[in-house]
Amino acid sequence: MNILATRRKERGLTQPQVSAELKAADSRMDVGMVSRFESGACLPTREVMPEVEKAYGAPRTELWSWDELDLLAGAPCKAADGPEEDDPVKGHGRKETRFRKCYRIPREFASSIPNDVLDVCGYSSWQSWHDAALRRLLGEYAARKKARRSA
């Protein structure tokens, strides 16, 4: 059980009660969304976050790790020489040179990836592999777009 579910139960709330509170910020909030927040499948949006903090009775920094909060709503990563920021979600005062993108893959798939896959395939990091994959994807996109125009 993660911290959200624990906090909710400590407060004597059910998921339907939490979703009713979150509807104040976003009418799409339902029990399924609360369940996804609690299971770690997704994070609340910036607009919903204050209501989540109220519902669970804790600040976001107690409910999620800094890394997770830095992913929230495409918040820019802090540059190595960038200033510290009080609110990691807003991203004000940061150099916006890179953005984080979070992908979730099935545990079974992740456990099947050999530890040396990056070295064997010539990548220095997951970031360098990701950059190369995006360049290939954009090249494929441009080629297909061109083919559609020609057809």
Image (cartoon, helix red, strand yellow):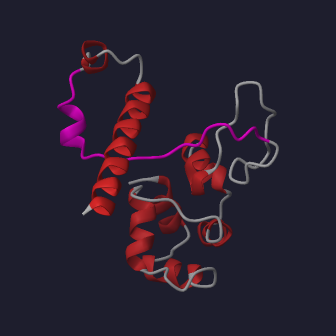
- Magenta residues span 94-114
The reply to whether residue 36 is visible in this rendering is yes
Residue 71 % position (x, y): 56, 48
Rendering coords of residue 13 (x, y %): 50, 76
Q: Nearer the viewer, residue 100 or 7?
A: 100
Q: Position of residue 77 (x, y in %)?
A: 64, 39
| 110 within the magenta span | yes
Q: Quadrant of the N terminus?
A: bottom left
The quadrant of the rendering that contains the C terminus is bottom left
Looking at the picture, does residue 72 appear above or below residue 114? below
Residue drawn 21% across and 22% down?
Answer: 114
Picture quadrant where residue 86 is located: top right
- Residue at image position (37%, 28%) is 129
Task: Please say whether residue 104 is visible from this viewpoint.
Answer: no
The residue closer to the viewer here, 73 or 59, is 73
For image coordinates 82% across by 43% down, the residue present is: 93
Most prominent secondary structure in the magenta stretch? loop
Is 10 part of what is drawn in magenta? Answer: no
Furthest toward the front, the residue is: 150
Q: Picture coordinates of residue 143 (x, y %)?
A: 32, 48
Compare residues 132 and 39 and report the one nearer the observer. Answer: 132
Q: Give the answer, above or below, for where 46 lies relative to 30.
A: above
